[in-house]
Amino acid sequence: MFTTKIDASDLQKITALLDGPLGQDIAQAVADEAVIPELAKEPFRTPGKKMIFVSSKQRAFVMAAIRSGDIQVPYVRTGKIGETQKQTTTNGVDVTVPAAYSDLVRTKGRQARYHEGTWPTTEDIAHEIEADEAELIATAKVIEALEKAGLT
């Protein structure tokens, strides 16, 4: 009979760190260094594509807003779509874009037809971050924490 003992005490120390402040540090680092910069990016300014109205009612509303000055032509970007707010949660960090119209610009399934293919959706951004940056940032934070704890 073969018997071996596996000492998981170092692993337990590491996972305990992840459940506490280290987990929050990793989430904060990923939010600060990967998520927020991606959300702040605007697509290159391209020659304005023609607006395709979905109804005559929508067209009348837009034209009235242009006449009243509520919509400026040419459109002046406010930059609010790149402003973000962070909130620490028990599982990490929530990053939100408080602009009331952000769903119509970035959320898949809610994105206005005009923005499709121009603005990346939040899903597109998440896939991009998951593939590269988040893993690198999290790994760097774990290594830093392990060094601080004297476990490396």
Image (tube, grey):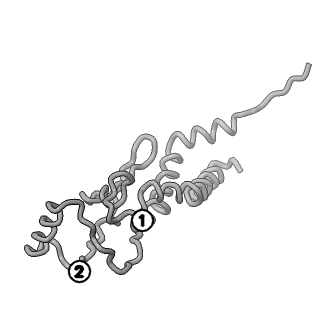
Residue most toward the front? 56
Q: Tell whether 68 sits left or right of 77.
A: left
From this view, report whether residue 118 is shown above or below residue 7.
below
Q: Earlier in the sequence, mark 1 or mark 2?
A: 2
Q: Position of residue 131 (x, y in %)?
A: 58, 56
Q: Position of residue 57 (x, y in %)?
A: 14, 60
Q: Tell whether 27 sits left or right of 66.
A: right
From this view, report whether residue 84 is shown above or below residue 75.
above
Q: Secondary structure at mark 2?
A: loop
Q: What residue do we see at 57% from left, 42% from top?
A: 17
User: Of residues 10 and 63, which is closer to you in this image?
Assistant: 63
Quickly name the residue at label 2: 74
User: Of residues 58 and 32, which is closer to you in this image?
Assistant: 58
User: Three-letter amino acid code at disc 1?
Assistant: Gly
From this view, report whether residue 135 is shown above or below residue 13.
below
The label shown at residue 117 is: 1
